[in-house]
Image (cartoon, helix red, strand yellow):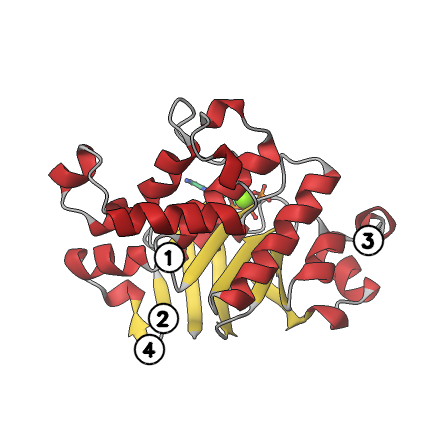
Amino acid sequence: MLEVKNLAKSYQKDKPALTDISFKVDSGKFVAIIGPSGAGKTTILRSLNQLIKDDDGQILLDGEDIRAANKAELRKLRRQIGMIFQNYNLVERLTVIENVLHGRLGYKSTISGMIGRYTEEEKREALELLDKVGLSEFALQRCSELSGGQKQRVGIARALIQHPKVILCDEPIASLDPASAQNVMKLLKDLTVEFNIICIANLHQIGLAKEHADQIIGIRKGQMVYNDVSENLSEDAIADLYGTAAVKELVE
Ligand SMILES: Nc1ncnc2c1ncn2[C@@H]1O[C@H](COP(=O)(O)OP(=O)(O)OP(=O)(O)O)[C@@H](O)[C@H]1O
Ligand SMILES: [Mg+2]
């Protein structure tokens, strides 16, 4: 279970980016974080894996406080947190399977990681994961030759080979066409259940968030104004988050 308690962050003095954010997520659940641009969604994800130092609060992953971790502990904890990015962050000139195997680097000493020494077991698992994301026949193709949707599926396989407890996705479908976006959302939801992990995705597509996520967290001006199962996300709640005029456009 992931439990966030009273998380707070200011990038600049007296200008809070996050104020008193608290929520819990159980394993096997897919959570969407929604809210207007600048609300603090990326700041939450970056705090969750400690890419930025937040100012206050607790982040408990299965009871262990990520914020209290020393450097060695943080390295271990980061293996348990996979990341998926809007721009995929793949090494385009390398093959699909090499990119998936990069997800194992957190488990390697620097030297063996650098010279790309992977075990047969890791390679077998990479192929299995590529099969799960529907890309087995692309294993030896360069990532530069893939579509956006395919690249994001490589990103998902790369996150899963880390054996994460949590996957954090910052706008995973923002660069995709509607069909690929739907496909990636369904895949994230299905794999979250299959691997019994926690998936947290920042999204601007409210319709897709409602359709696929179990839980929705709404952030406005650094504050959590909504936290409930996705079925309960009403037009009023959306209007509260984004303003009334935006409702019609956003729910369609
Ligand atoms: N590195 C930074 N230095 C200073 N201020 C920052 C930094 N990163 C973000 N902010 C500020 O913190 C607030 C929250 O930003 P954040 O990127 O978390 O928003 P967001 O909800 O992810 O927005 P978007 O939907 O546009 O991605 C904004 O006011 C932003 O300007
Ligand atoms: Mg953002």
56 relative to 176, above or below = below
| Label disc, if present, on residue 61 of the rendered structure | 2
* Number of residues whose C-alpha sits closer than 10 Å to that of mark 1, classed few (under 14), some (14–19) or many (20 or more): many
Gap in Å between the C-alphas at discs 3 and 1?
31 Å
Gap in Å between the C-alphas at discs 4 and 3?
36 Å
119 vs 81, left or right, is: left
Gap in Å between the C-alphas at discs 4 and 1?
15 Å
Residue 113: x %, y % from top left:
19, 39
Gap in Å between the C-alphas at discs 2 and 1?
10 Å
Quadrant in which residue 214 is drawn: bottom right
Is disc 1 placed on a helix, strand or loop?
A: strand
Q: Give 153 or 6, whichever is nearer the viewer.
A: 153
Say which amino acid is labelled 4. Answer: Gly
Query: Which residue of the protein is positioned furthest toward the bottom in this rendering?
Result: 63
The residue carrying mark 4 is 63
Closer to us: mark 3 or mark 1?
1
Closer to us: mark 4 or mark 1?
1
Q: Is residue 83 visible?
A: no
The residue sitting at 22% across, 51% down in the picture is 107
150 relative to 78, above or below = above
Q: Quadrant of the N terminus?
A: bottom left
| Label disc, if present, on residue 81 of the rendered structure | 1
Task: Say which label, 2 or 3, has the lower sequence index.
Answer: 2
Task: Say which label, 3 or 1, has the lower sequence index.
Answer: 1
The residue carrying mark 3 is 251
Is disc 3 placed on a helix, strand or loop?
A: helix
The answer to whether the residues at label 2 and label 1 have Cβ atoms under 8 Å apart is: yes
Residue 190: x %, y % from top left:
59, 61
